């Protein structure tokens, strides 16, 4: 495995930043992006297979807009396209905001995972509620479940409806370009169709250099 071009495998890098008060540049040592990439992969099961690989920030698809300053303006999306490209984009968006203060909360899950984590009784006896998904600044759900569960349709539709009502963005990933009815048979319902009617539909395409090395400008964009 080749060493990171930014840190040479040390896990740390030196970047030039501007002092918030004097406005003068100074050198700062911080955790390298390759290590932050591994941290994010470890935190999100759907990203674990990516390990330290991520998409350079200047290649994040501009259609995947997430602005923490005006969260109510962030779009609700129906996302189609290459799955690896989708996860790489999502991972780099999460990395970009890792050191924000306050740090935004992301939920990335398959639909069956949402049902298990926010609807059914947990192993410790606690009973979660779907409204708990509102604590997340961005909810990203993959509608690709093969496992049949009669409650799945209601759960996904309710999460989408509740977050839409509270003006909190939700992104739904679909395996291919077909309509909802033919794309997510386990999650589909007329209510979900209605609740996503105003969602923006986008296509994520695979671009050259997806797994190219990171750049120094990416590293300098982080702050701790």
Image (spheres, grey):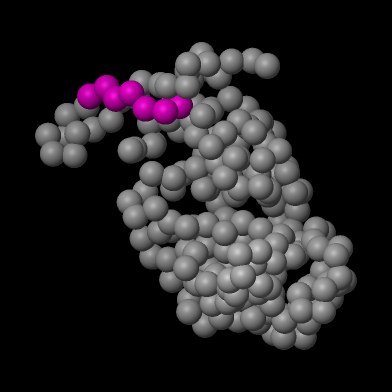
Q: Is residue 18 visible?
A: yes
Total marks in image:
0
Magenta segment, which residues? 26-32
Residue 59 place in picture, x, y as percent: 57, 40
* Figure quadrant of residue 112: bottom right
Q: Is residue 217 visible?
A: no
Give above or below for 172 relative to 2: below
Quadrant where the image shows the N terminus:
top right
Determine the residue positioned at 52% across, 82% down: 165
Determine the residue positioned at 51% across, 14% down: 8
Q: Main secondary structure of the magenta part?
A: strand
Answer left or right for 180 relative to 9: right
Answer left or right for 47 relative to 100: right
* Figure quadrant of residue 121: bottom right
* Figure quadrant of residue 196: bottom right
User: Is 221 one of the magenta-colored residues?
Assistant: no
Residue 79 place in picture, x, y as percent: 69, 60
User: Is 28 one of the magenta-colored residues?
Assistant: yes
Answer left or right for 181 relative to 26: right
Determine the residue positioned at 86% across, 70% down: 148
């Amino acid at each position: 495995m080749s060493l990171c071009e930014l840190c040479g495998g040390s896990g740390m890098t030196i970047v030039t930043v501007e002092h918030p008060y004097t406005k003068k540049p100074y050198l700062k040592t911080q955790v390298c992006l390759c290590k932050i990439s591994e941290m994010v992969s470890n935190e999100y099961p759907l990203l674990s297979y990516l390990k330290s690989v991520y998409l350079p920030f200047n290649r994040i698809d501009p259609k995947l807009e997430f602005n923490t300053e005006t969260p109510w303006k962030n779009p609700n999306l129906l996302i189609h396209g290459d799955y690896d490209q989708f996860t790489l984009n999502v991972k780099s968006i999460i990395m970009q905001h890792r050191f924000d203060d306050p740090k935004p909360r992301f939920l990335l899950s398959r639909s069956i995972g949402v049902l298990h984590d926010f609807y059914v009784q947990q192993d410790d006896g606690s009973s979660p509620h779907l409204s708990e998904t509102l604590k997340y600044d961005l909810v990203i759900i993959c509608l690709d479940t093969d496992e049949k569960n009669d409650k799945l349709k209601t759960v996904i539709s309710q999460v989408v409806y509740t977050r839409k009502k509270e003006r909190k963005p939700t992104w739904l990933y679909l395996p291919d370009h077909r309509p909802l009815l033919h794309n997510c048979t386990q999650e589909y319902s007329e209510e979900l169709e209605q609740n996503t009617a105003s969602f923006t539909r986008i296509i994520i395409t695979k671009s050259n250099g997806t797994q190219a090395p990171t750049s120094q400008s990416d590293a300098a964009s982080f702050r701790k």
